[in-house]
Amino acid sequence: MLGYIVKRLLLFIPTLFIISVVAFFLSKNAPGDPVERFFEDSFSEKSYVLQAKALHLDKPLFYWSVLPRVLPDTFHTILRPYKREVVKSLALQTGDYKNALNYYEALESSIQQFELAYSQAKSDTLLSNINILKGLIAEEHLKTISQKTAGLLFIGQDEADQSLRTFNAALQDLESTDKSKPSPPNMGLAKLIWNGVDNQYHIWITNFLKGNFGYSLVSGKETSDRITSALFWTMIINISAIMLAFVLAIPIGVYAARHNHLQKGRTVTLITYFLYSLPVFWVATMLIVFFTTPEYGMDWFAGIGLGQEAGHSSIVQLVIDRTTHLILPVICLVYPSLAFISRQLSGAMQEELKKDYILTARAKGLDESKVIWKHAFRNSLFPLVTLIGSILPATIAGSVVIEVIFNIPGMGKLLVDSIFLQDWPIVFIILLLGATLTMTGILLADLLYAKLDPRVRLK
């Protein structure tokens, strides 16, 4: 058994590593600048740099990097994403990284000086220069840059004009490099750089394993606070639904299997098929419309949400209010699971009841309940064990449809809200949590298979 566990762990760890790497790089390619999202209003360059370093964005992405030879090993220290892309593109065009960087820094300095001059004395010439320079912030093509800068004019202010001279000189150096080296040697070749453990991925995955999920881009608060709050309600709903589904599904599945050839067995099978075919979103909507409003005279349950925080005289009343709001969401989670589990168990039980050892047990005069529960049911557990692989992620990830329709602040609703708000750290942490629990569920199911059937260990 120990050897089987070791083999499964050897598959579990690298798979989880690959999933975490995919989630990390997806988060890094999400749209927008994660540093700018922290600031609601204007911010200084110093504030930007400090926040970027706090997010470890001044470190390389991974344990190793593959870069064109024209770029230095410290290329990752350029913090602005658009600046990094422009400098990289210009360096590849000219084969000169230093001049490309000098050009962009001169561009930033000129924009700053002309904006300062415009705040002191507004003029059309100043505004024209500012618009031209800002139009170069994301411009990656050297010929287009040369064409756009033709309209720049000196204004007679020393600091602004000096910054423009510096910018023109840096642009000329870049253009001369491009003319003198139309095809720089080794420019297109790549180099492999080993970064060690001081990289963004290592810090990110280490913090994840410690339960530190970083910061929300929207609120600026720790992601773990929002996830913990959402996780509480998701677990309440899903654990209740899972327990209730199994408690009801097991006797229903056994009953349907025992009476498979009778009318009452077929009726149970038909009902489970019918329940499983009903779309969850439609059932949830119908329950809200007919059973939470007085319009149809059946306002038997509380409406959407969790009720009011205030206005309760005791904790007992608060718990009762919360429970009444969770009844319908739990029902919507129970009925499809109930139908699926009972169908799976019924099919497995029917196969077991046809086998010779069941006939032998009955021929020996064993009590029917022992034949069913001690022999047939035990050997019919494999479909239920398979469901464990989906139970764990469902318990944590939650049901997006149910939580959104019933306005339950769980993990599913948090995921949807975070996608709409482009709060990518939360989105990808939930992705990684779901993937981790899916892998854990599969591992647990494999171990239970091995425990129930020793033949599995030999595979």
Image (cartoon, rainbow, N blue to C red):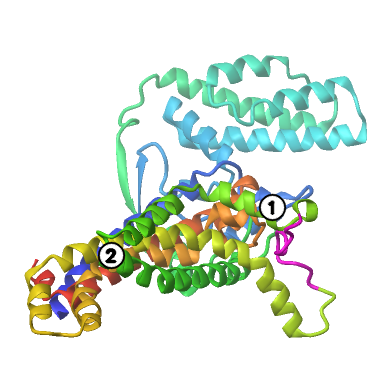
Q: Is residue 75 above or below residue 143?
A: below
User: Is residue 380 shown left or right of residue 100?
Assistant: left
Q: Residue furthest front?
A: 263
Q: Position of residue 99 (x, y in %)?
A: 52, 33
Indicate whether 315 appears above or below 58. Answer: below
Q: Which residue is mark 1?
A: 290
The local secondary structure at tag 1 comes to helix
Few, some or many residues within 10 Å of mark 2 (<14, 14–19, 20+): some
Q: In the rendered image, which quarter contains the N terminus?
A: bottom left
Dot 2 corresponds to which residue?
A: 259
Closer to us: 136 or 370: 370
Decide if residue 360 is in sight here: yes
Dominant SS type (magenta): loop
The magenta stretch spans residue 306 = yes
- Tell me the amino acid under the disc marked 2: His
x%, y% of residue 358?
Answer: 12, 74
Residue 418's place in the image compared with 450, above or below, is: above
| Secondary structure category for the residue under label 2 | loop
Q: Which residues are magenta?
A: 297-309
Residue 238's spot in the image, x, y percent?
Answer: 51, 67
Tell me which residue sits at (83%, 74%) in the image.
310
Residue 8 magenta-highlighted: no
Q: CA distance from mark 2 to mark 1?
A: 35 Å
- Which corner quadrant of the image does residue 337 belong to? bottom left
Could you tell which of marks 2 and 1 lies nearer the N-terminus? 2
Residue shown at the point (59%, 44%) measured from the top left: 80
